[in-house]
Image (cartoon, rainbow, N blue to C red):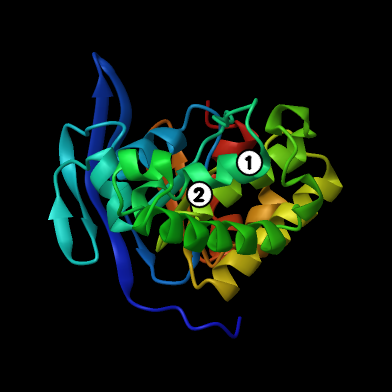
Amino acid sequence: MSKKVGDVILDVHNISLRFGGVKALTDISFNVREHEVRAIIGPNGAGKSSMLNCINGVYTPQEGTITFRGQTFDHMDSHAVAKMGIARTFQNLALFKGMSVLENIMTGRNLRMQSNLFLQALRIGPAEKEEIAHREKVEHIIDFLEIQAHRKTPVGQLPYGLQKRVDLGRALALEPQVLLLDEPMAGMNVEEKQDMCRFILDVNDEFGTTIVLIEHDMGVVMDISDRVVVLDYGKKIGDGLPDEVRNNPDVIQAYLGTSH
């Protein structure tokens, strides 16, 4: 791979998360390097989404720390995380179904808007200039994701694969340094998966965005990831290059179910 992967941008250290007596994550550590595609894989119930939820401040772990760009936190605040430059897509689409593609992606710009809501509503003075600038950014994302033909279509009328693309666009509108993707290809057919793979690699390449990805399709993971961390029952059982992970006996066991 010719791209240049940089230093560690995100470091997850000894994270443990419990819900009552249930251990969702136990002593998990791994890091993410700038400009890489870092996959988190594992069987259902392994704790993958819980891990992303700790990183973007939805859950507060009982133990451990998360370091982002040299700043260490024992818990992340979801609003602060977005401001710091970490964006997230969700497994279940949280789009505004009655709003257009353009409007949905514009909502991702909210944190970047400087003028107050009153000026935005009236669209006067600096707010008008600002909205034009934000709209240009959004139009660029729409072009990039090849959804120009649907820009005014209510999102609820689009096929599922395109809705997932709009979700990606909304996250990109934040101009994140790190993009957390929670099963971006779930429920897609082969062609839609190929498209989404291409867009993820293009985001990584053209925008220089670091990507942390949860994905069930092992073929996809092996094709597009630089490094892979494997969780099983909330514990880390593997971490390394795709080929190392693919040949790891513990990983093979977890996926084939012979250990349980």
Q: Under tag 1, what secondary structure?
A: loop
Location of mark 2 (residue): 171
Q: Which mark is residue 216?
A: 1
Q: Which mark is residue 43?
A: none
Residue 55 pos. (x, y %): 32, 45
Badge 2: few (under 14), some or many (20 or more) residues near its Cα, within 10 Å? many
**Can the viewer see residue 159?**
yes
71 shown above or below 235? below
Residue 137 pos. (x, y %): 54, 62
Name the foreground residue: 16 vs 134.
Answer: 134
Q: Is residue 109 left or right of residue 144?
A: left
Name the foreground residue: 148 vs 260.
Answer: 148
Q: Residue at x 34, y 45 (%)?
A: 119
Q: Quadrant of the N terminus?
A: bottom right
Q: Amino acid at mark 2?
A: Ala
Q: Residue at x 28, y 31 (%)?
A: 59
Q: Is residue 200 left or right of residue 68?
A: right
Q: Residue at x 36, y 36 (%)?
A: 53
Q: Under tag 2, what secondary structure?
A: helix
Q: Residue at x 33, y 49 (%)?
A: 82
Q: How many marks?
A: 2
Q: Closer to us: mark 2 or mark 1?
A: 2
Q: Amino acid at mark 1?
A: His
Q: Is residue 123 left or right of residue 248?
A: left
Residue 240 pos. (x, y %): 47, 63
Residue 158 pos. (x, y %): 78, 34
Badge 1: few (under 14), some or many (20 or more) residues near its Cα, within 10 Å? some
Question: Which of the 4 image quadrants contains residue 177?
Answer: bottom left
